Amino acid sequence: MLVTGGVRRLGRAFALALAAEGADVAVTTRALDGEADAVLHELKEQGGQAFAFACDVTQPGQVTSAVAGAVEALGGLDILINNAGVFEATALEALTPEQWDAMYLTNTRGPFLVAQAALPHLRASRGRIINIGSLGGLRPWATHGPYCASKAALHMLSQTMAKAWASEVSVNCVAPGMIVFPGEGERLAAKTPMGRDGSPEDVVSAVLYFATAPAFVTGQVLAVDGGLGLT
């Protein structure tokens, strides 16, 4: 299994959860630093193999190298979790072309490049791709125009991949709403029908579902938002 952006926050949670289920895990990160070392240690404590590769998903050469390294280290590839992404709030009228392009390079083109590089190996294993979208790709947020647009594009890309690469590879997308990590304060709990913000475990459960569901489940975008998108 390969998790992009697998050292911090949700990426780390995905990697640890799948390692706990017995998966050998490779993660990518922009820098092989102390945080990467700590995650590798945690992953190996689960009893499986764990590897980390430096990769900026906006750089095609780094993507190709990281995927090849992960495939060699793991002995193949059956699950890709495209998690690497960026988030930025910017007033739409003040947005620069450079900001717009940077958001799409990471949030939309990056997952495509990783999936494209991984595709031959996923076809061989009849594997699956799980892209991490956002509630922002389903609902407009006025101060996050390029982020919302890039995630909406990723949702459509996920469905296009699912149609183009069936029947060998299933492709689905998880779209988290407001997710709060331990130690962080409440954000939108009062506006959320379920009465709380989401937790990393909520999103992990959705990813685990797509990782283990029948391959017949494909082309889905699953919001994990406690009903926030209904308000």
Image: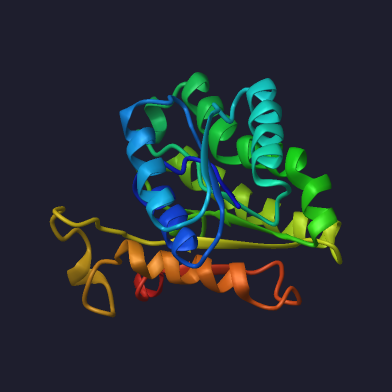
Could you tell me if residue 91 is visible in this image? Answer: no
Colouring style: rainbow
Q: Residue 93 at what x, y percent from top left?
A: 40, 30
**Which residue is located at x 77 percent, y 53 percent?**
122
Residue 68 placement, left or right of 163 = left
**Which residue is located at x 57 percent, y 34 percent?**
104
Q: Residue 156 at what x, y percent from top left?
A: 67, 55
Residue 230 placement, left or right of 154 = left
Which of the pair 61/93 is nearer the observer? 61
In the picture, residue 23 is in which quadrant?
bottom right
Q: Residue 105 at what x, y percent from top left?
A: 59, 30
Q: Residue 40 at what x, y percent from top left?
A: 41, 42
Which of the pair 134/100 is nearer the observer? 134
Residue 90 placement, left or right of 128 = left
**Which residue is located at x 63 percent, y 31 percent?**
66
Q: Quadrant of the C terminus?
A: bottom left
Could you tell me if residue 96 is visible in this image? Answer: yes
Which of the pair 195/207 is nearer the observer? 207
**Which residue is located at x 86 percent, y 66 percent?**
167
- The mark tally for this picture is 0
Which of the pair 128/97 is nearer the observer? 128
In the picture, residue 13 is in which quadrant?
bottom left
Vertical side of 35 occupied by 179: above or below: below
